[in-house]
Image: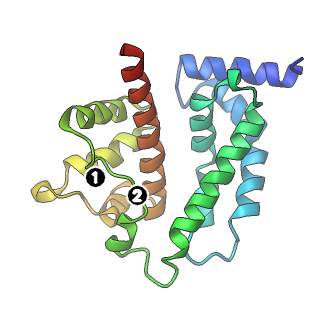
Amino acid sequence: MKNNFQTQDNDLIDAVQANPSTSSNELQELIDRHSGIYMDIVNNYIPSNCNFLNKSDILEEKNYRIYLAALKYDEDKGAKFSTYLGNETKWMCLNLFNKNKKHQYISIEEERCLDETEQSLDEFDQDFFDKIISLAEQHPDARVFRIFKNRYIDGNLNKVMSWQKIAKNLDMSIQGCINIHNSALEYFKNKLNKEINNVK
């Protein structure tokens, strides 16, 4: 039998999924309940003296990461939300660490290296591209659309805008912009693929 704490978590998550607002009371309560899990795992998996990954950026993304986990969580798969969030955070940390470790002797400002750490819309056809841009525009976190618009629409001569310029426009770190971009793109792809499969 599920304990009362997990039942309350599920009720909060249902409310967030039904109304995916980043300013909802339900989301804030979920964040208050589970911030410790996120912080502990980031602290365990990302060394404080890491010279190729900005740990503070990852810690500052706590609310956004918990929000994404709530949107993707499926209680029917059996795992408690705390367990699911812990696993998502662990793999996020490991992926970021491993992807950036090989660049530890190269400046993170160098666009050539940054491009190796990001996903891209270039692989999709125009229809899929348009749908993802539309989803980005509707995203409750305004930074998502600003990043996608800067990267793919506002670039000069049909070239993507550099991450360095995007980071300056948003007053964020380069890696922070890439992290938000990659997380949102993965969520959009999964959402559109589910819609396609449901139509078939």
Q: Upstream in the sequence, badge 1 or badge 2?
A: 2
| Image vertical order of residue 80 relative to residue 116, above or below | above
Asked if the residue under mark 2 is in contact with the one under mark 1, i.e. CB atoms within 8 Å, the reply is: no
Q: Secondary structure at mark 2?
A: loop
In the rendered image, which residue does mark 1 sit on? 151
Q: Residue furthest front?
A: 200
Quarter occupied by the C terminus: top left
Is residue 8 visible to us here?
yes
Q: How is the image coloured?
A: rainbow
Q: Which residue is depicted at the point 57% across and 29% down? A: 71
| Image vertical order of residue 57 relative to residue 48, above or below | above
Give neighbour class at mark 1: few <14, some 14-19, many 20+ (Cα, 10 Å): many
Cα distance between the residues tagged 1 and 2: 12 Å
Viewer-side residue, 166 vs 117: 117
| Image vertical order of residue 57 relative to residue 135, above or below | below
Q: Quadrant of residue 160?
A: bottom left
In the rendered image, which residue does mark 2 sit on? 118
Where residue 160 is drawn, which disc sits there? none
| Image vertical order of residue 148 relative to residue 105, above or below | above
Q: Amino acid at mark 2?
A: Glu
Give neighbour class at mark 2: few <14, some 14-19, many 20+ (Cα, 10 Å): few
Viewer-side residue, 150 vs 74: 74
Q: Which residue is depicted at the point 24% across and 49% down? A: 152
Q: Amino acid at mark 1?
A: Arg
Residue 42 in the figure: left or right of residue 112: right
Is residue 173 visible to us here?
no
Q: Which residue is depicted at the point 45% across and 41% down? A: 186
Q: Secondary structure at mark 1?
A: helix
